[in-house]
Amino acid sequence: MKQAVLNWLFPSYCMQCQNTITTSLGLCDYCLEDLPLFDFSKHKNLLHRPDIVEMFPNCEFDKLFACAFYQPPFEHWLKRLKFNNQIHYKKALQQVIQKQLTQFFEQSPTLPDTFIILPLHKSRFITRGFNQVSQVWQPCLANYASVSNVLIRNKKTRAQSELSKAKRIKNLKNAFICTEDMGGKTVAIVDDVMTTGATLNAATSALKQAGAKQVWAFTTCLTPI
């Protein structure tokens, strides 16, 4: 009853069409269905999708999940959240992620042993004040597996967006350390945008050195190359 009154007094609006919605979500059902999202009924693992294999031929992780390509409106939402901390975009992103996770695990019901949200270097965390990936993803993962903090970003790297593909790889060499034995585990690493795969590959390397049997990569968007 209380929530119904609050919804009436302070209505929410869909971020796409601006129509009133009666919940605290970011998108209406129609706009959510209209988004250009990946279809996991066709490819359970995006590393098996031919166009994505061509874009990212050197992935060291074993499975890839993403919601969509890094294009409007996702590009706009992610930038506003990451660089301006406009947290109202978080609601829309979480709706998209939850929708895609549901479809993904319906098609591929095996769960990872744990999720690891890729950490920021401590200096970047202090500067920014938050980890936008954790803000968006952590509530979405609660129904699937625990979230661990066993990766440390021990190397302060330049922003990847400033670098070429070759320099991104060099920039991230030995950037992560795993603090626990991951022997025999299937681990899912989580990031917001995959551009070349260098960050996810670096994290995968650290986890496999720690004994992980498989590493899956979960990301909100893929940058089309």
Image (cartoon, rainbow, N blue to C red):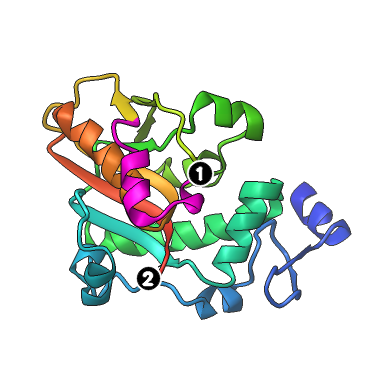
* Residue 144 numbered tag: none
Of residue 147 and residue 170, the one placed in the foreground of this image is 170
Mark 1 surroundings: few (<14), some (14-19) or many (≥20) residues within 10 A:
few
- The C terminus appears in which quarter of the rendering? bottom left
Q: Position of residue 13 (x, y in %)?
A: 75, 67
Give SS at disc 2. Answer: loop
Res 144 visible: no
Q: Position of residue 121 (x, y in %)?
A: 48, 29
- With respect to residue 95, does 159 lie above or below? above
Mark 2 surroundings: few (<14), some (14-19) or many (≥20) residues within 10 A:
few
Q: Position of residue 10 (x, y in %)?
A: 85, 57
Residue at image mark 1: 159
Residue at image mark 2: 225
The magenta stretch spans residue 164: yes
The magenta stretch spans residue 137: no
Part of the protein shown in magenta = 159-175
- Quadrant position of residue 221: bottom left
Mark 2 residue type = Ile
